[in-house]
Image (spheres, helix red, strand yellow):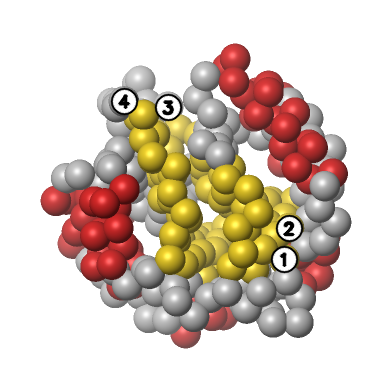
Amino acid sequence: MIILAWNCRGLGQPSAIRDLIALVRDSNPDVLILMETKIVEPVLVSRLRRIRFGKYLYVPHVGLSGGFCLAWRDYIELEPVSISKNLISCLVFSNPVSSPWLLSAIYGPVRSVEKRDFWLNFHKEVDRFNGEWLVIGDFNGVFYRVSDCRGPQGGSLHLGLVELPSQGLKYTWSNGRGASQEIKAKLDRGIANADWWNLFPNADMKVLPQISSDHSPVVLNSEGCSSFARRPFRFEAIWTRDRRSH
């Protein structure tokens, strides 16, 4: 299974729509996770239909921020478990058919006051599920010690979750300022428990260059980097917009 996750920072502009179409064409994802869409649901549906995603879950934006979507192809069998503005969880039945597993798309809270409550509730979410589990998306925070999967700003999870290895860029976000003021961080990632790793021992991720957003898209392939290699990478003009691609 291939999962594309991207904090697109708005899908209202033609440039963002073009970039999304190019990303989907090149990575050919089975599941699509979008954060900060900033568009109403009918517009989202038209965007999804254009890239042939017929099923979705959506938390609409509020004001000038938000908009959180998990979409999947018609041939993928997902069953929604829970949905909130920060976490969308589904059981995956089609890959593999014999071993359903939990997929959680994450769009971590930005405000510090909301982070603590979110991670406390995250603990409870895990306590209610015993089985294979993957979390992927924008955590909106950095882990101080990834090996222990400490939550953003030091909120320790102690859930036995391990980050998926990634290819490509080291960081997934930057503030886009000049060299002396530039700040970079790895906010977007995938983490999984031991049961999920046993199911997909070769899983891997790619961090792609930034395009029309200050977040890099990330692509997970449950079959690993060899499967990435079988899908030829086509150089697109959009990559040249990122100075780090030179």
Say which residue appears at 28% left-offset and 67% top-offset: 49
Direction from residue 192 to residue 178 in the image, left or right: left
Above or below, 14 relative to 138 = below
Say which residue appears at 21% left-offset and 55% top-offset: 17
Say which residue appears at 43% left-offset and 66% top-offset: 55
Circle 2: residue type: Trp
Label 4, secondary structure: give it.
loop
Report which quarter residue 21 is drawn in.
bottom left
- Residue 241 shows in the view: no
Return the residue nearer the eye: 175 or 2.
Answer: 2
Circle 3: residue type: Ile
Circle 1: residue type: Trp
What residue is disc 1 on?
A: 101
On the image, the x and y values in percent for residue 141 come to: 57, 31
- At label 2, counting other C-alpha atoms closer than 10 Å, the crowd grade (few under 14, some 14-19, many 20 or more) is many
Q: Earlier in the sequence, mark 1 or mark 3?
A: 1
In this rendering, which labeled residue sits more in front, label 4 or label 1?
4
Asked whether the residues under the numbered discs 2 and 1 touch, taking CB atoms below 8 Å apart as contact, a structural biologist would say yes
Label disc, if present, on residue 63 of the rendered structure:
4
What residue is disc 2 on?
A: 133
- At label 1, counting other C-alpha atoms closer than 10 Å, the crowd grade (few under 14, some 14-19, many 20 or more) is many
